[in-house]
Image: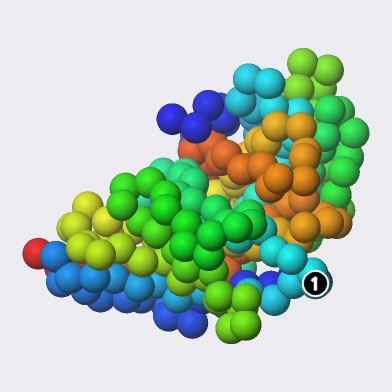
Amino acid sequence: AQSVAQPEDQVNVAEGNPLTVKCTYSVSGNPYLFWYVQYPNRGLQFLLKYITGDNLVKGSYGFEAEFNKSQTSFHLKKPSALVSDSALYFCAVRPYTGRRALTFGSGTRLQVQP
Amino acid sequence: DSGVTQTPKHLITATGQRVTLRCSPRSGDLSVYWYQQSLDQGLQFLIQYYNGEERAKGNILERFSAQQFPDLHSELNLSSLELGDSALYFCASSDQETVSGNTIYFGEGSWLTVV
């Protein structure tokens, strides 16, 4: 069975500084990896995904993520944080074959201070 | 706006009651997924339907059931409700499954409060 770990419940960063939200995964075979963001009282919004190819994936709102197969990680990054980036971020995995539903991590709350 | 529509947005009901949550997937999407988000359990996959047929089951209780209709909308039925069923229930949809890793898009969710 697949699993996702987000080791940090909360990440605090100052506006304008780079941010990283960590994610590691466990899955049989090749993974599909996703990042979603949830703003207060809103649904999950898709940010980006890794399917195959380039290990650096670019997504919405200036976010990017780096796939590292040897470390089974898919960390979310942004060069310069905005206060409006403050939200709950979820990493998710789906195996290449088998169950198509996403398995989510526990989420990381990002707080960007002005 | 993801294109996935869920109703109702908020629902308050008493223990022991039954409720139905409704979901309209994005236009053209054949797969519908239901997830439960609670403070203690996080985001839990409940069940998936594909073109009217059940495709996968997750941590769905026996008191819960779902179906997908010919017009592809889906309903999640929750019965004999308990306080612990209070949660945000998400519906999500994706298009025909391919090997390229299709994206799953989520609705805004239905807030269920059991009192």
**Residue at image point 74% right, 72% down:** A27
Horizontal side of residue A95 vs B87, given as left or right: right
**Residue at image point 61% right, 43% down:** B103
Vertical order, B23 against B86 (above or below): above
Q: Amino acid at mark 1?
A: Ser
**Residue at image point 66% right, 50% down:** B35
Can you name the residue that lies furthest to the left here?
A114
Horizontal side of residue B115 vs B94, given as left or right: left
Badge 1 local density, few (<14 within 10 Å), some, or many (20+)?
few
Vertical order, B106 against A21 (above or below): above
Give x and y (percent) for residue B107.
Answer: 54, 37
Residue B91: quarter of image: top right
- Viewer-nearest residue: B67 or A31: A31
Residue B92: quarter of image: top right
Chain name for mark 1: A
**Residue at image point 42% right, 50% down:** A59
Horizontal side of residue A66 vs B14, given as left or right: left
How many labels were placed on the picture? 1
- Viewer-nearest residue: B66 or B106: B106
Give x and y (percent) for residue A72.
Answer: 61, 78
Dividing the image into 4 quarters, which one contains the C terminus of chain A?
A: bottom left
Vertical order, A91 against B114 (above or below): below
Give x and y (percent) for residue A108.
Answer: 42, 70
- For mark 1, give the secondary structure: loop
Q: Which residue is mark 1?
A: A28
Viewer can see residue A94: yes
